[in-house]
Image: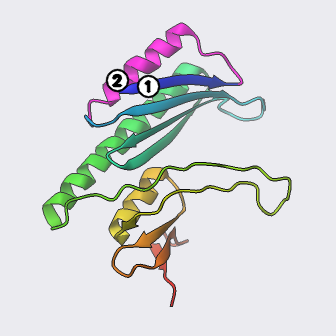
C-alpha cells in the first residue's frame, strides 16, 4: 500500500512519519487491494479544543472510500486513535462484503466515483461544491457506503428503479430513504 503522510499547519517529523507508515502497513494487511492511503496530521490553533492534534486517514479499498479521524493531545496519540478506527472500519467492511457474497446472487460491487473539484464561494448559501460520478447501486450498498464515509446522508442512483435517491439517518437511529414519485 502506498501511504502519503503530510501535515497541515505543522511539519511531520521523521519518527512520526515512520511510525505512521509502519502502522498503516500493519492495517493494510486486512485488504490486499488497498492501493493508496492518505494520512493527514492537523494542528488546530484553538487552545480551547481538548484534542489539539487531529489525524485524518482516507483510503480507497475495493471500490469504497474509508475515512476516519482521530483526535489527541499529541500527534502520536491522535495517530493511534485514527489507526485503531481505521482497522475497525476495514474489518467491518470486509465482514460485510463476505456476508454479502454469501447471501447475494450478484457478487460484483459498485464503486462510487471519486470526488473531483471543490469550489469555495464567497456567497453564504453555497460554500462547497462536489462533483462525482454516480454508479447504480442497491439500497444495501448505499447504506454500506454511507457508513464507511461516516456521513449522515448519502445521495445515490438506485439500481432497481433507476431513480436518484437520498439515504439518511433519522433522529430515532433508523434509516430513511427519499425516492422521487
Instruction: Tell me the number on the disc at residue 120.
Output: none
Q: Which residues are magenta?
A: 9-30
Q: Name the foreground residue: 111 vs 177.
A: 111
Taking the view exactly as shown, the residue that stands out farthest to the top is 14
Give the x, y percent position of residue 40.
57, 29
**Magenta-drawn stretch contains 24:** yes
Q: Earlier in the sequence, mark 2 or mark 1?
A: 1
Give the quarter of the image for residue 162: bottom left
The residue nearer to you, when weighing 15 against 110, is: 110
User: What x and y, as percent, mark residue 119?
Assistant: 72, 50
Q: Which mark is residue 25?
A: 2
Q: CA distance from mark 2 to mark 1?
A: 8 Å
Q: Residue at x 78, y 32 (%)?
A: 46
Task: Determine whether 14 is above or below 159 in the image.
Answer: above
Residue visible at 50% across and 91% down in the picture = 181
Query: On the rendered image, what quadrant is the N terminus found in?
Result: top left
**Magenta stretch: dominant SS?**
helix
Residue toward you, 82 or 138:
138
Magenta run includes residue 93: no
* Mark 2 crowd level (few <14, some 14–19, many ≥20, 10 Å Cα): some
The structure's colour scheme is rainbow
- Which residue is at a point 58% across and 10% down the rendered structure image? 13
In this picture, residue 123 sits left or right of residue 12: right
Residue 149, horizontal then vertical, whole percent:
48, 51
**Rendered view: 16 above or below 46:** above
**In this rendering, is residue 6 above or below 92?**
above
Find residue 154 and report its horizontal and vertical position in percent: 51, 64
Q: Is residue 115 left or right of residue 106?
A: right
Disc 2 vs disc 1: Cβ atoms closer than 8 Å? yes
* SS at badge 2: helix
Residue pointed to by mark 1? 3
Q: Is residue 161 left or right of residue 42?
A: left
Amino acid at each position: 500500500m502506498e501511504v502519503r503522510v503530510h501535515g497541515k499547519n505543522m511539519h511531520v517529523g521523521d519518527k512520526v512519519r515512520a511510525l505512521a507508515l509502519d502502522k498503516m502497513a500493519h492495517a493494510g494487511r486486512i485488504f490486499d487491494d488497498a492501493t493508496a492511503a492518505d494520512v493527514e496530521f492537523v494542528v488546530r490553533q484553538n487552545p480551547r479544543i481538548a484534542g489539539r492534534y487531529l489525524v485524518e486517514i482516507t483510503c480507497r479499498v475495493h471500490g469504497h472510500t474509508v475515512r476516519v479521524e482521530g483526535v489527541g493531545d499529541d500527534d502520536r496519540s491522535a495517530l493511534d486513535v485514527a489507526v485503531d478506527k481505521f482497522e475497525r472500519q476495514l474489518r467491518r467492511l470486509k465482514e460485510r462484503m463476505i456476508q454479502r457474497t454469501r447471501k447475494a446472487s450478484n457478487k460484483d460491487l459498485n464503486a462510487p466515483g471519486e470526488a473531483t473539484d471543490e469550489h469555495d464561494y464567497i456567497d453564504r448559501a453555497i460554500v462547497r461544491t462536489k462533483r462525482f460520478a454516480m454508479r447504480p447501486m442497491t439500497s444495501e450498498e448505499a447504506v454500506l457506503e454511507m457508513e464507511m464515509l461516516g456521513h449522515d446522508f448519502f445521495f445515490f442512483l438506485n439500481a432497481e428503479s433507476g431513480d436518484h435517491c437520498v439515504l439518511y439517518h433519522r433522529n430515532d437511529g433508523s434509516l430513511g430513504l427519499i425516492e422521487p414519485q
